[in-house]
Amino acid sequence: MIRTRGLTRRFKVKRRVVDAVRGLDLDVAKGELVAFLGPNGAGKSTSLRMLTTLLPPTSGEARIAGHDIRSDAAAVRRRIGYVGQGNGAGPYFRVRDELVTQGRCHGFTPAESRRRADDLLATMELEDLADRPAGTLSGGQRRRLDIALGLVHRPELLFLDEPSSGLDPQNRANLWEHILRLRDQLGTTVFLTTHYLEEADTKAERVVVIDHGRIIADDTAERLKANLAGDRLTVVTDNAARAARIADRIPLAREVVVDGDAVRLRVPDGSAVLPVLLRALDAATVDVRTAEVRRPTLDDVFLALTGRSLRESAA
């Protein structure tokens, strides 16, 4: 569905050439839900604008739904939907009218445009708002309308650029319910950018991490967390120095540190390793007062890859 090789975009900033995206290699299969994760300025939106033919690449190549973004841009646009960060509907136009107009822009008849508009109003739970001006909708309602506008022509692939940015937690959760239901019903491939770690962690089947214009990780959230970050084990004992020496002998243990009477270490599977460690400490007559396993986050993954926090970089 998406295939890129060496995709690069350079900008000239104050007489200096800057690579916003550097050699993007990416493969996305039909039906996948992929989160493109990274801090502000990492190259997420620039990548999307190239993949949706809104911005020509400086070098490299990309094919979307089998069509080249340079030589066959019109065919690419017929097969994709794109929802940018801004609102797409005019604030003074009624919700249904905006959807009908979008259908007419795609070449559908007036009757077909109205039918598709009504279907999407029902799907996105906007029926009661159909005659309201778009500018009177709440933030979450407007984002649902934006997605509906991107789906009028029933695209094979839907690009969402920061779809829930600026929404409160309740509206974000509601929006995601609609995105996931649409994908399940229509089988649409969804490729979205986000800097919300929880969204990428819990909603996406696959997470692609970009930083400084380069992809630095690409896998499921669970495998990224297990392989790159690992679980954090903390045991509080009566002999931390001795406990640390025992912990250091645990297979795959890393980052073993003593902090007062606590010993902390990272391992790929904390739930399986903790009983092993506790048995070893008991055999060595080291008294364990408390023990804790903390699962990693995608921020831990980014920290392991770059040495800095993604939350801080995205702020």
Image: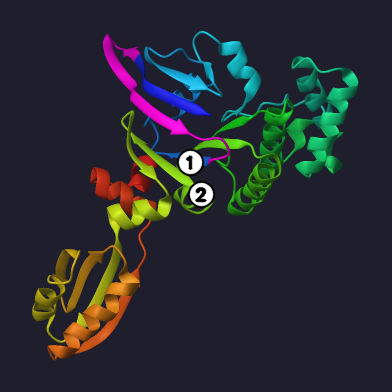
Residue 163 at x, y percent in the picture: 58, 38
Q: Quadrant of residue 5?
A: top left
- Type of amino acid under label 2: Glu
Q: Which residues are magenta?
A: 11-32
Horizontal side, residue 122 vs residue 212: left or right: right
- Type of amino acid under label 1: Ala
> Is disc 1 placed on a helix, strand or loop?
strand
Observer-nearest of 266 and 154: 154
Give me the C-alpha separation between circle 1 and circle 2: 8 Å
Residue 51 at x, y percent in the picture: 49, 22
Residue located at (32% from left, 76% from top):
292
Horizontal side, residue 259 vs residue 49: left or right: left
Residue located at (9% from left, 77% from top):
241
Q: Do the residues bearing badges 1 and 2 touch, measured as CB atoms within 8 Å? A: yes
Residue 16 at x, y percent in the picture: 26, 12
Q: Quadrant of residue 42?
A: top left
Q: Residue furthest right?
A: 111
Horizontal side, residue 123 vs residue 44: left or right: right
> Is disc 2 placed on a helix, strand or loop?
helix
Please name the predominant secondary structure of the magenta segment in the image.
strand
**Mark number displayed over residue 35:** 1
Q: Is residue 26 magenta?
A: yes
> In front of the other: label 1 or label 2?
1
**Mark number displayed over residue 199:** 2
Residue located at (45% from left, 42% from top):
195
